[in-house]
Image (tube, coloured by chain):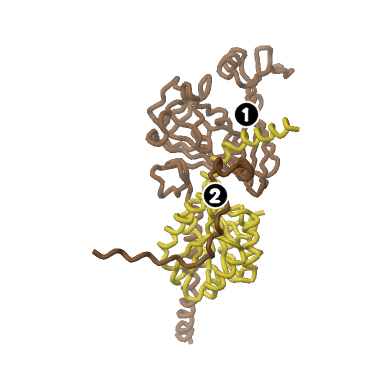
Chain colours: A yellow, B brown
Amino acid sequence: MAGDRMFLVVLALVLAVPGTVRAGDVAVPIGLQAELLFAVAGHDRNLSARSGGVVRTLILTKGTDDSARCAAQFKAAAVARSAVAGLPHSVEVASFTTASALAQVCHARRIAIVYLTPGFTGAEVAAIGQALEGGNVLTVSASSTMVTRGAVLGFDLVSGRAKLLVDPIQAAKQRVAFGADVLGLMTVPR
Amino acid sequence: MKTLRSFVSVPLALLLCFPVSAYADDVSNLAGLLDEPVVSTASRTAETAGLAPATTSVITAEDLRRHGIGSLDEAINFLALGMIAEPSYGTPEIGTRGVLLSGDYGNHVLLLVDGHAVNEPWDGTAYYDRSAAVPMDLVDHIEVILGPGSVLYGSSAMLGVINVITKRAKDYPGLHLVADGGYPASGRAAGGYGTEFELMGRQGELTAGVLLFLGLCTRAGALIAIWMNLNYLMMKGWLNNDAFNDRTWIVCHVVVFLTGAGLVAGLDGALSRFLPSWLTGAERGRQPAPAPGPEPAPEPAPSH
């Protein structure tokens, strides 16, 4: 029994070392993510209704190095956008506590876009998606795997090209409405 | 009547055209962003090709499949960008236009797999005919930089850098079997598997591939191949055909490729719960983070 456990641990370490290093290399650049996000957000039919005159983007962080690095890079790219879809744009950064607290903040401050930095678990993103149902906010994840967990939009890199991933069911729950021509440029993950 | 019709139809046509054309421009802008190549070799970080400090040529998995490219040297010659691969007794020799150092076994070009150098440390040899030990079906794309890259990558990058990026498990789900070849010269069979999983709350993935090269050669060629490739399987041919006599051998190269991601992260997160804080460096009893809110206003600059 102990031998089996040792074998599994050794096997896991052998398998994981190259892949873990690679996983950090293959990602859509943060600057390109920001460009794509604000270009797509302009095609959301409910953006002007939800923003109330000012598009507020909330960068949600976790207490990890990757999250902090991503938040800093995304903020630098986001503040350069003074306007989104012709509306004034402002950027805020906050740490994640609970999904319900996030929903309250989004409602109170009329947050239009929530950007989830890396470091969120699937359960946390699912809780965020559930808490924001019925609200009016676009949630975007830097990680492609979180689109199937509760984020509306995500980014992926395939064959050296960025891809937009969308969960249309979650988008409908959060009142995000993209046109057919934009949806044609997106991929729905299985 | 004709004047009235023109008077109405021209403004109406203009009215209908303007918003549509503006909207189409926005979508084309988004499509342009999605079509921009993302490379990671020029500066060891993912960036758009337009911002990269070196010109990078990319060949994608779709190109490899569509054009029947079965090895890395074929892919390099397919790109035709000035870097060339020439067949040799051992591994194909690689060079650039005007600079092909015969007998250097490709040690003037750095070969990377997912950013890791795979040139042999002893003499810098890189094996392009076996696709850098990566089955071509697992290749997501190949980035090629023509020109010196030794400032970033050290030795072996004098003529250029080739980076083979493998597929993620989500792009290679399930079991894949591939077989191709040309009778009686060569054959290739490959199998692969990719899966995603969750380990202790962390996302993980695993991709695996096995590649089998078959090639006919004479006994002398086989002996040279044995000498060159002791770590590869070789077996004598058993085909009962006039075209194959006792001096014809089947050379068989087996390439196995495995990669996994997320396992270390999952194990690290799980084990750190049971280890003392002085060992892991983690802060115990961390205070909960404050609720999201506006950023504090910057402090006023001191007046002098």
Question: Residue at left 67%, top 37%?
Answer: B192
| Disc 2, SS | loop
Residue A93 to residue B86: above or below: below
Q: Amino acid at mark 1?
A: Val
Question: Residue at left 40%, top 36%?
Answer: B152
Disc nearest the viewer among 1 and 2: 2
**How many discs mark residues in the rendered view?**
2
Q: Earlier in the sequence, mark 1 or mark 2?
A: 1
Q: Chain of mark 2?
A: B
Label 1 crowd (10 A; few <14 / some 14-19 / many >=20): some
Query: Residue farthest to the right?
Result: A1
Q: Amino acid at mark 2?
A: Glu
Q: Is residue A77 found left or right of A22 in the rendered image?
A: left
User: Could you tell me residue A29's position as x and y percent?
Assistant: 48, 51
Spatial separation of the CA atoms under disc 1 and disc 2: 45 Å
Residue, disc 1: B255
Q: Quadrant of residue A188?
A: bottom right
Residue A57 to residue A14: above or below: below
User: Could you tell me residue B229's position as x and y percent?
Assistant: 58, 19
Residue, disc 2: B283
Question: Residue at left 41%, top 49%?
Answer: B50
Tag of residue B193: none
